[in-house]
Amino acid sequence: MKLPLLFRRERTVIKRADAQDQVEKVLAESLRVLSQVCTKVADAIETQRLERAGYAQNTLLRRLDTPRDEEKRKKE
């Protein structure tokens, strides 16, 4: 009469598969969120770097301190 023991083993295998599936889903979602955070941090760092280099934010890389403007200011 080992038949009930077999059914119990199958249930634990199913439970393990479900648990592993849930862990994999949580891990995949966590990695997606982490990648979004890393992307936002990288964008912020790049924005700061461009601002230090003299480019305005939300423009098509137009310099704020062009050499022509500096020459005109020096002449005046």
Image (cartoon, rainbow, N blue to C red):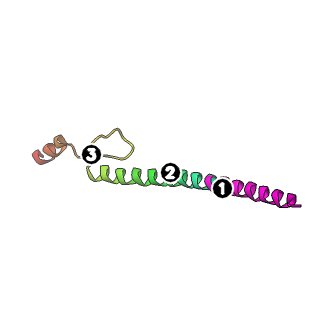
User: Residue 74, relative to residue 8: is it above or below?
Assistant: above
Q: Which residues are magenta?
A: 1-24
Give the quadrant of residue 2: bottom right
The label on residue 69 is none
Residue identified by numbered label 1: 20
Residue identified by numbered label 3: 64
Question: In the visual, does 75 lie left or right of 18?
Answer: left
**Mark 1 or mark 2, earlier in chain:** 1
**Mark 3 or mark 1, earlier in chain:** 1
Q: Residue at x 71, y 54 (%)?
A: 18
Q: Residue at x 17, y 40 (%)?
A: 68
Indicate the position of residue 42 as horizontal and vertical percent values: 40, 52
**Mark 2 or mark 3, earlier in chain:** 2
Q: Residue at x 69, y 57 (%)?
A: 19
Q: Amino acid at mark 2?
A: Gln
CA gap between label 3 and label 1 equals 55 Å
Are the two marked residues, 2 and 3, in contact with CB atoms closer than 8 angstroms?
no
SS assignment at label 3: loop
CA gap between label 2 and label 3 equals 30 Å
Which residue extends farthest front?
1
Indicate the position of residue 26 as horizontal and vertical percent values: 62, 55
Q: Amino acid at mark 1?
A: Gln
Q: Is residue 18 magenta?
A: yes
Q: Amino acid at mark 3?
A: Leu
Question: In the visual, does 12 lie left or right of 22?
Answer: right
Q: Is residue 10 magenta?
A: yes
Are the two marked residues, 1 and 2, in contact with CB atoms closer than 8 angstroms?
no
Residue identified by numbered label 2: 36
Which residue extends farthest top?
60
Q: Nearer the viewer, mark 2 or mark 3?
A: 2
Which quadrant is the N terminus positioned in?
bottom right
Are the two marked residues, 3 and 1, in contact with CB atoms closer than 8 angstroms?
no
